[in-house]
């Protein structure tokens, strides 16, 4: 479903990704762990097409398409969802308006009919319920005045509404208390644990993986995957540290 | 009251950002014309304006405890100026929301002179400018507080977004305060569209042109937020945004 091959990327002329290769098949959840500065967030942004991140070598194939050829909004319409480590505040634009525009833009790009206001609200209510986010929060401006945990839950509501084929979740667990972590973990499972979907979880800690069981765990160091293993590998990493395991 | 007998030039402070070519060819008599309006004591008046090419000047006397609200869109060119002079009686309020929006070589400006002539009057002005091409959006706002106009509360806020290099905006706040127990606040900022927000929208599937429109809508919405009639506020927003649709950005 997602095939990254020998990916090199840089920001402001500084090389961050140095030949990263990774394949995630449909139905799989992969976790990427690694020390600060390894390039984990850079990988997420490169996949999401954020301006300023330049791919200098390598390829990314997503659902049979050359992902790197697509504009960021086209990547979303193709079914890629990027969960932000720091969700952005948009004063003056409500979550409902933002998400309805997003969903209908994606539907239009796929040649589907737009959802009506009523249909959209029903869908939004269902997904907000899944993440135990009050509907009133969705009437407020995008992320404005939300706590760290609320922002992350709101991101997962967005994911539920947009129903992507593949999610790249960049430290979705940061800023969450233990209850919110469980809710978010269960939300990810409910939305994305399907035979036709895939997930790439970027995380510092094992704790999210207690809820979202990965099929494969990778360690990323200095812009490359240095070692991969099964779910038990994350536990070993947590006990022994990256330095020992990646050596 | 003395009127301008000769044509102003851009050497005049109040006309410093005006289109000098347009001014030179203007009709001096027409330019000196002020429309007059009075809001009787205790009453409220809400006016909307779509500025057209040229200069429109409006002089308003707001009576005791009366309220005058003016909401305006300036999307015209090549030179369009709406000038308002408001004199506030005791306890009166003046609310102004203005949006300049346009591209090309358009020069669009609001000029306000708010005279707090008596104690306890309030005024609030919110102006937003969205320009592209080589267009310019200006706000010249003068607030005068006379010696005995204690407890005056006046505020003025101008923000501009320049969508392209080459566009510009000018703010010229002027406060003349002769009373000592007053609150006068003003702020001005010129910037670009929030690129982080634009990318966040793109990451959710919103194409750049739609994202820009949503962000501009949110930005200029500030100017109409005080409108009690929501349908009217919505209509003003739509009118201003229609100008953005014409832009080939």
Image: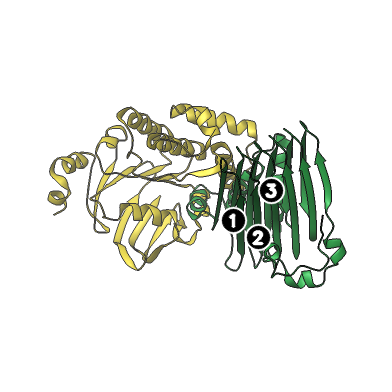
Using residue A84 as the reference point, say whether residue B10 is left or right of it: right
Q: CA distance from mark 3 to mark 1?
A: 21 Å
Query: Quick one: A10 or B183, which is closer to the camera?
Result: B183
- Residue B187 in the image, given as x and y percentages of width and height: 55, 51
Task: Please name the residue that numbered disc 3 is placed on.
Answer: B114
Circle 1/circle 2 CB separation < 8 Å:
yes
Tell me the number on the disc at residue B137: 2
- Per the model, the C-alpha gap separating discs 3 and 2 is 20 Å
Instruction: Please rate how many residues cluster around mark 2, counting C-alpha atoms within 10 Å: few if below 14, some from 14 to 19, many from 20.
Output: many
Q: Is residue B43 above or below residue B183?
A: above
Q: CA distance from mark 1 to mark 2?
A: 8 Å
Between A15 and B144, the one nearer to me in the picture: B144
| Dot 3 or dot 2, earlier in sequence | 3
Mark closer to the observer (3, 2):
3
Q: What colour is chain B?
A: green
Dot 1 alpha-carbon crowd within 10 angstroms: few under 14, some 14 to 19, many 20 or more: many
Label annotation for residue A60: none
Residue drawn at the location 70% of the way across and 60% of the way down = B108
Q: Which mark is residue B160?
A: 1
Color of chain A here? yellow
Which of the image's four quarters has the C terminus of chain A? Answer: bottom left
Taking depth in this image into account, of B134 and A38 the one nearest to the observer is: B134
Residue furthest to the front in view is: B147
Give the left or right position of residue B34, taking residue B226 as reference. Answer: right
Residue A174 seen in the figure = yes
């Amino acid at each position: 479903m997602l095939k990254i091959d020998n990916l090199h990327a840089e920001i402001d002329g500084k090389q961050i990704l140095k030949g990263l290769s990774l394949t995630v098949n449909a139905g799989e959840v992969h976790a990427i762990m690694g020390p600060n500065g390894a390039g984990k967030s850079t990988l997420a942004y490169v996949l999401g097409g954020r301006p300023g991140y330049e791919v200098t070598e390598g390829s990314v194939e997503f659902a049979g398409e050359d992902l790197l050829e697509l504009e960021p909004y086209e990547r979303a319409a193709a079914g890629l969802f990027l969960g932000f480590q720091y969700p952005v505040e948009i004063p003056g634009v409500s979550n409902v308006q933002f998400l309805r525009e997003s969903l209908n833009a994606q539907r239009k790009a796929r040649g589907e009919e737009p959802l009506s206001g009523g249909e959209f609200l029903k869908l939004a209510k269902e997904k907000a319920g899944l993440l135990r986010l009050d509907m009133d929060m969705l009437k407020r401006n995008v992320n404005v005045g939300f706590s760290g945990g609320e922002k992350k839950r709101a991101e997962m509501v967005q994911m539920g509404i947009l129903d992507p084929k593949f999610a790249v979740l960049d430290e979705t667990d940061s800023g969450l208390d233990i209850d919110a972590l469980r809710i978010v973990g269960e939300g990810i499972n409910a939305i994305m644990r399907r035979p036709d979907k895939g997930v790439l979880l970027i995380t510092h800690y094992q704790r999210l993986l207690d809820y979202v069981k990965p099929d494969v765990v990778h360690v990323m160091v200095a812009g490359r995957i240095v070692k991969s293993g099964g779910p038990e590998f994350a536990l070993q990493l947590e006990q022994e540290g990256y330095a020992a395991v990646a050596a | 009251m003395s009127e301008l007998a000769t044509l102003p030039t851009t050497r005049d402070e109040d006309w410093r950002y005006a289109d000098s070519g347009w001014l030179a060819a203007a009709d001096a008599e027409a330019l000196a014309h002020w429309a007059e309006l009075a809001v009787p004591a205790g009453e409220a008046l809400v006016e909307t304006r779509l500025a057209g090419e040229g200069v429109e000047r409006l002089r308003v006397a707001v009576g005791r405890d009366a309220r005058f609200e003016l909401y305006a869109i300036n999307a015209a060119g090549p030179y369009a100026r709406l000038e308002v002079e408001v004199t506030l009686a005791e306890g009166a309020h003046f609310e102004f929301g203005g949006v300049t929006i346009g591209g090309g070589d358009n020069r669009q400006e609001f000029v306000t002179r708010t005279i707090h002539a008596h104690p306890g009057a309030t005024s609030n002005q919110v102006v937003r400018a969205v320009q592209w091409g080589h267009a310019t959006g200006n706000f010249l706002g003068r607030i005068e507080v006379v010696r005995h106009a204690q407890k005056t509360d006046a505020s003025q806020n101008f923000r501009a977004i320049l969508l392209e290099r080459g566009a510009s905006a000018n703010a010229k706040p002027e406060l003349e305060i002769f009373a000592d127990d007053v609150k006068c606040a003003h702020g001005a900022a010129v910037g670009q569209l929030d690129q982080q927000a634009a990318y966040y929208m793109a990451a959710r599937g919103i194409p750049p042109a739609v994202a820009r429109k949503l962000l501009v809508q949110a930005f200029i919405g500030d100017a109409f937020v005080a409108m009690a009639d929501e349908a009217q506020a919505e209509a003003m927003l739509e009118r201003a945004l229609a100008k953005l649709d014409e832009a080939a950005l």
